[in-house]
Structure formats: structure tokens, C-alpha cells
Amino acid sequence: MPSAFQQSVIDEFRANAGKVGGPFAGSDLLLLTTTGARTGQPHTTPLGHVRDGDRLLVVGSNLGAPHHPDWYHNLLAHPTVQVELGDEGFQTVAVPAEGPRRDELFARVVAEAPGYAEYQAATDRALPVVVLELPDPQAPALDVTSLADKLTEVHTWLRGQLAQVHAETEAHFAARAAHRGAGAPPPPGLGLQIRQRCLAFCQALEFHHTREDGHMFPAMEGYHPHLRHVFDRLRDEHRTIAAVQSALAELVAGVAIAEPDRFRGELSRMTEQLTAHLDYEEAEILPLLAGVPWPPRP
């Protein structure tokens, strides 16, 4: 639960399209809603931010305390977060920066908000810098008016996260290959980024499948009993995909020492399994959902 002071800031922020008074008057604030690492409940925190191109940077300063703030531990456990900025809100994956990239971004923050240097001087821990990507204004907006549209939106997001994992692991291997000289290559600073993308994908897919098995499929079977074989196959695939998700997380956890060709082969095999499931579900289920309005009507 936010403190009484934090809740007053949250309420004022939401009532005034992101503008607040008092000690934060004129500050660049956002509201970050994370999922509790232990409770699984949503937690909203007002945070200062620095805009850096198409991303927002937030710092886990905790006012220079010796431990990271709770919201930072939450996003490590549940990378998908909700951001409120002004009168707009969006979902994104929170990615802490590492190594030289963290230092570069922290310098960028301090140049605009020098107080963070004082917080860093007050503690021995490196203050985390978390990157929150803004929505792409050039991305075509999907007009979601049916449950079929909503399913397509979810699947598109899932495919996008998988593509990011592929791209970031290739960047990791490129950095390793570019290393020259004696000694181990320096870490490219993508370990946490790859982990967060993979975890966000796996958690979203698990939540999606749980909702399908628990609510959507039983309701659809009542209207389409002749398609029971389709729903049975999808439920069976959900169990198989759960094992693939676990294997994917284990594979990604070892990316720092992985042999690139073997890693690429395993990642491609898992991606084929995951996308084949999404493809089959879309082919069989989307036509049945095209006439179901979204959001649901009262």
C-alpha cells in the first residue's frame, strides 16, 4: 500500500493529467504500477523520470538508502509494468541497464537531475537505472472491437517479445565475437535485458493460457461442441508449451556462456514450437470470436 503522502500524490496526478503541486511542483513525474514480487498485487509508485529519446529513465534511488526500493524488486519478478504519463497510460517491459550502459544512462540522468548524484554518494550500492520504452508512435494502432481482435493483439505482443529475445541474443553474441585481446570478453550488458524480455513473454503466455483454459474454452465449447477436438488439442499444447517456456527460461539464463550455434538452434526450435501453437490457435479460434464484442458489453 502506498503511504498516505504517496496516495495523495497519485490522486492529484490522476485528477490533473499528471500535474502535481507541493514539493513535486514542476517535476517530471510518472506513475509506475508493478506487480508485487511476493503478493502478486498491483503497487503504484510516483517516480521522477528523465526522457531520453523514445524511452523514459527511472532510478531506484530510494533516497540513497542502502537497499533497493520495493518497486525495483517487483519489476525484476514481474517485468511487465503499467506507466501513467500525463493523461496517458501504456504497458511496457521494464529493463534495468547493466555495466557501461548503466553508467552512461546514469550520467544522462544526473545531467538533467543532479540530485541523483547526491543519492548515489550516500550509498555503496549502484543505483539501478531502469529503461521504460515509450510506445512507437509509428506503429499502426489495432482497432480492437471484437474478441478476435483482442486475441490477435495479445499474440502480436507475444511474437514481438520473442523477436526481441532473438535480436538481443544476437547483439550479445556479436559483442562477444568482437572482443580482442587476452582475458574473458567484457559482459555486453544485455543479460538482464534478455532475461526481462524472456520472463515477460513467459508470464504473459502463462496468464493467457490460464484464462483460456479456465474461462474462454469452456464457454466456447458450449456453443461449438463439434470442435471439442480443437479445444482438447489446444489444452494439450498448453501443457507442452509450459515445458517449452521453462526450457526457454533456462536456455536464456545461460546465454553468457552459451555456444552461439547451439544456442541459436535451441532458440529457433523453441520459437517454432511456440509460434506454431499461436498459428494453430488463430486459424481455429479467430473465426469463432469475430462476432464477440470487445470490451464485453454489460
Image (spheres, rainbow, N blue to C red):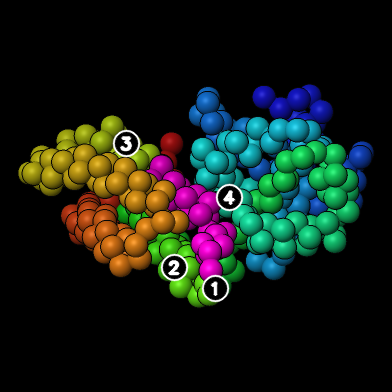
Q: Nearer the viewer, residue 189 or 8?
A: 189
Is label 1 or label 3 in front?
Answer: 1
| Amino acid on which the number 1 mark rests in the picture | Gly
Point 44% across, 46% down: residue: 199
263 shown above or below 15: below
Image: 170 above or below 40: below
119 part of magenta stretch: no
Residue to which mark 2 is pinned: 173
Evaluate if marks 2 and 4 touch, with contact meaning CB atoms under 8 Å apart.
no
How many other residues sit within 10 Å of disc 3, few (<14), some (14-19) or many (≥20)? some
Q: Quadrant of residue 159?
A: bottom left
**Which one is earlier in the sequence, the residue at label 2 or at label 4?**
4
Which circle's residue, 1 or 2, is located before the other in the chain?
Answer: 2
Which quadrant would the N terminus be assigned to in this image? top right
Check residue 94 in the rendering and tell me which mark sits there, or answer none: 4
Mark 3 or 2 closer to N-term? Answer: 2
Which residue position is annotated with label 1? 181
CB within 8 Å, label 1 to label 3: no
**Residue at the image point whose x is 30% and y is 67% from the top:** 261
Cα separation, mark 4 vs mark 1, equals 34 Å
Kindly report the distance in space between the C-alpha atoms of the residues bearing marks 4 and 3: 23 Å
Q: Who comes first in sequence, dot 1 or dot 3? A: 1
Q: Earlier in the sequence, mark 4 or mark 3?
A: 4
Task: Report the magenta residues as a range.
Answer: 182-203
Q: Nearer the viewer, mark 1 or mark 2?
A: 1
Comes first in the chain, label 4 or label 1: 4
Task: Tell me how far mark 1 sits from mark 3, CA to CA.
Answer: 50 Å
The answer to whether any part of residue 107 appears in the image is: yes
Q: Residues within 10 Å of mark 2 (few under 14, many from 20)?
A: some
| Kind of residue at disc 2 | Phe
Residue 266 x, y percent position in the rendering: 27, 59
